[in-house]
Image (cartoon, rainbow, N blue to C red):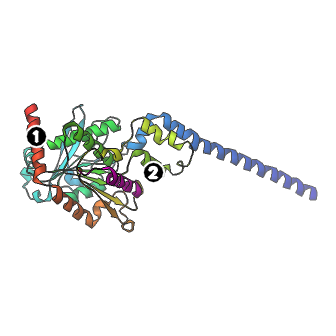
């Protein structure tokens, strides 16, 4: 009986050792695949880098009827398509300001009417959205609904998103689309022009205004940055998905440095130094996608390096207790007041005349 007991005991002990050894080997293999091979594949795959950043394959909400913005809570809006200089069709919604919602149904369905009222001198806001989803996203619609109380709102999808012409997005392409849309608005209105960028759209909008300021001296009346990051390198390193990897000694080389080398940079902390337009930054403390301190970093760079000839950059913090997170600052009661004051301050006649002079010059040269 004793011999049988010890035999079974020794057999169980050996079996446990084998199980533990096998578990250890599997764990090491999994660790190696995830934290070693995974980052290497990421560095070598431009397609993977691009998809992880832009997420344009996540098209939500699904099955949007873009021709009917009213189905998504936007009466008094129209859908249209504009063709860029490089032949890309961009899907656009033009959303009338609240004071024009009482027009009759005939006018609401008239393209001529929409074209005319866009040139009625009211402030126009061009919205540049972040990665993933489309212009009908719930948080975006809430923003349009609130901001139409101040603006004539124009929103669009970059090439590769929603119903715009499909192409794989990269920084050059989305910035080119943003630049085209700014110029499209410039040629449609003589009113003040404000740009609103959210998340990745903050990187697009700052880059666009840098380019236009240097190309032809254009300055928007104002730039609104919602949940911005200072540059993509820091954003990738601080993103929640990167936290398990960021302390690895090879992380910078294989992930953010690799993306930087492939032209995925979105260096807002450089671009905001190269145009004069006033900027207001909105950021929630509980932002789980773009950490709050990256928005603060961008603001600090602006305070330190923008010159006296450039307009001020202001920062508005939203307490984390309100749970606005990354998407819902538009719901905050104070947001409308902040933007209203911003628009009143910078919608001056000199700016209107500047836009009109640009239109006259462009028409003469065409």
* Magenta-highlighted residues: 290-308
Residue at position x 89%, y 56% in the image: 6
Q: Is the residue 45 above or below the residue 287 in the image?
A: above
Based on the picture, tell me whether residue 130 belongs to the magenta stretch: no
Classify mark 2: helix, strand or loop. Answer: loop
Residue assigned mark 1? 359
Left or right: 352 in relation to 21: left
Quadrant including the N terminus: bottom right
Extreme bottom residue here? 321
- Horizontal and vertical percent for residue 261? 43, 35
Give whichever of 178, 162 is nearer the camera.
Answer: 178
Residue assigned mark 2? 239
Classify mark 1: helix, strand or loop. Answer: helix
Give whichever of 271, 166 is nearer the camera.
Answer: 271
Kindly report the secondary structure that dominates the magenta region of the rendered protein. Answer: helix
Residue at position x 48%, y 50% in the image: 241
Left or right: 150 in relation to 160: left
- Horizontal and vertical percent for residue 23? 69, 48
Left or right: 275 in relation to 13: left
- Horizontal and vertical percent for residue 239? 45, 51
Callout in the foreground (1, 2) = 1
Left or right: 284 in relation to 212: right
Q: Is residue 189 visible?
A: no
């Amino acid at each position: 009986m004793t011999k049988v007991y010890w035999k079974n005991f020794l057999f169980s002990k050996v079996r446990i050792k084998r199980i533990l050894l096998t578990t250890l080997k599997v764990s090491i293999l999994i660790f190696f695949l995830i934290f070693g091979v995974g980052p290497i594949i990421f560095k070598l795959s431009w397609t993977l880098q691009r998809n992880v950043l832009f997420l344009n394959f996540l098209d939500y909400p699904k099955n949007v009827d873009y021709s009917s913005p009213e189905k998504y809570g936007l009466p008094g809006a129209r859908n249209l398509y504009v063709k860029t200089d490089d032949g890309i069709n961009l899907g656009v919604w033009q959303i009338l300001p609240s004071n024009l919602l009482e027009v009759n149904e005939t006018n609401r369905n008239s393209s001529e009417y929409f074209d005319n009222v866009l040139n009625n001198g009211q402030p126009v806001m061009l919205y540049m959205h972040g990665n993933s989803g489309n212009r009908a996203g719930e948080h975006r619609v809430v923003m349009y609904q609130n901001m139409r109380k101040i603006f004539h709102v124009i929103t669009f999808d970059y090439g590769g998103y929603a119903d715009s012409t499909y192409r794989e997005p990269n920084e050059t392409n989305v910035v080119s689309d943003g630049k085209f849309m700014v110029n499209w608005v410039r040629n449609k209105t003589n009113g003040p022009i404000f740009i609103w960028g959210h998340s990745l759209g903050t990187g697009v909008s700052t880059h666009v205004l840098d380019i236009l300021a240097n190309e032809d001296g254009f300055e928007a009346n104002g730039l609104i940055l919602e949940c911005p990051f200072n540059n993509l390198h820091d954003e990738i390193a601080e993103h929640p998905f990167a936290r398990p990897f960021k302390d690895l000694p090879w992380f910078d080389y294989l992930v953010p440095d690799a993306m930087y080398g492939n032209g995925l940079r979105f260096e807002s902390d450089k671009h905001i130094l190269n145009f004069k337009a006033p900027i207001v930054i909105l950021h929630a403390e509980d932002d789980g996608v773009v950490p709050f301190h990256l928005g603060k970093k961008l603001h600090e760079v602006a305070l330190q390096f923008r010159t006296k000839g450039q307009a001020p950059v202001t920062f508005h913090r939203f307490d984390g207790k309100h749970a606005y997170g990354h998407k819902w600052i538009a719901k905050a009661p104070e947001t409308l007041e902040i933007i209203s004051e911003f628009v009143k301050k910078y919608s001056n006649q000199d700016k209107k005349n500047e836009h009109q002079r640009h239109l006259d010059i462009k028409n003469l040269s065409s």
